Amino acid sequence: MSLIDKLQWRYATKKMDPAKVVPQDKVDQILEAIRLTASSSGLQPYEVLVITNKEIREKIKPIANGQSQIVDCSHLLVFAAWDNYTAERINNAFDMTEQIRNFTSEAGTAYRQMLLKVYPARDAEVNFTHAAKQVYIGLGTALIAAADAQVDSTPMEGFEPQALDTILNLKEKGLRSVVMLPLGYRKADEDWLLNLKKVRRTKENFIRWIK
């Protein structure tokens, strides 16, 4: 199957088979794709929590509209953004870059100082919103990577973020939940959405060429 064929194959799975477990190598491949994806200034201002614990997932289900995929999936990914940009977080990112590349540059130093001047001075909610936008780049990459591995997934915003933050103790980690992504395998005989045609706008109504 080509990538386009796999994207045609994927859909937001409504019913997952709790008896089927996604192999570790496929989970690792999806997580590595997220880790390698793009982010603004290369800061990667979020973390991905992988929840396999059934008891924790049972606690999450009621604050997520009772969506069954949360407990029936193989692995539940929670994308949690930084609650703020701090000098420490920015410096850690640039220090890591200089260490891995084994050099510093005037341009890199100037860019670091610019971010240190602008980001920490902004309102924390503005910074969280910016970080949350980076999460969606990772989510998009995860959806494509899961499709490539022929693993089913369902992006979820339908939950109570503050309640989830409490369950996962995110506040003390300086994180706030943004979106969840169950990974698993469809239960074909119980998923009403499976056999419905994929609906997308036509290319003519979706893509504009400016020449």
Image (cartoon, rainbow, N blue to C red):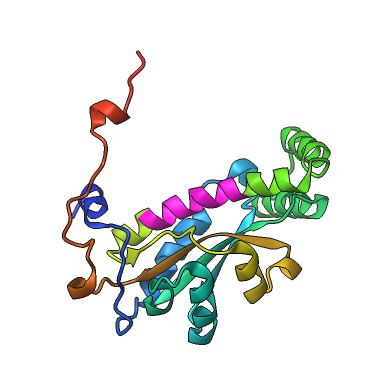
Q: Is residue 45 on the magenta stretch? A: no
Which quarter of the figure is the C terminus placed in?
A: top left
The residue at the point 50 percent across, 79 percent down is 57
| Count of all numbered marks drawn on residues in the image | 0
Q: Position of residue 6 (x, y in %)?
A: 24, 54
Q: Which residues are magenta?
A: 132-143
User: Magenta part mainly helix, strand or loop?
Assistant: helix
Of 4 and 129, nearer the camera is 129
Q: Position of residue 126 (x, y in %)?
A: 71, 43
156 above or below 170?
A: above
Residue 105 relative to residue 164: left or right: right
Q: Is residue 138 on the magenta stretch? A: yes
Which quarter of the figure is the N terminus placed in?
A: bottom left
117 above or below 89?
A: above
Whether residue 7 is visible here, answered yes or no, is yes
Residue 101 relative to residue 91: left or right: left
Q: Position of residue 155 (x, y in %)?
A: 42, 59
Residue 188 relative to residue 171: left or right: left
Whether residue 103 is visible here, answered yes or no, is no
The residue at the point 72 percent across, 38 percent down is 108
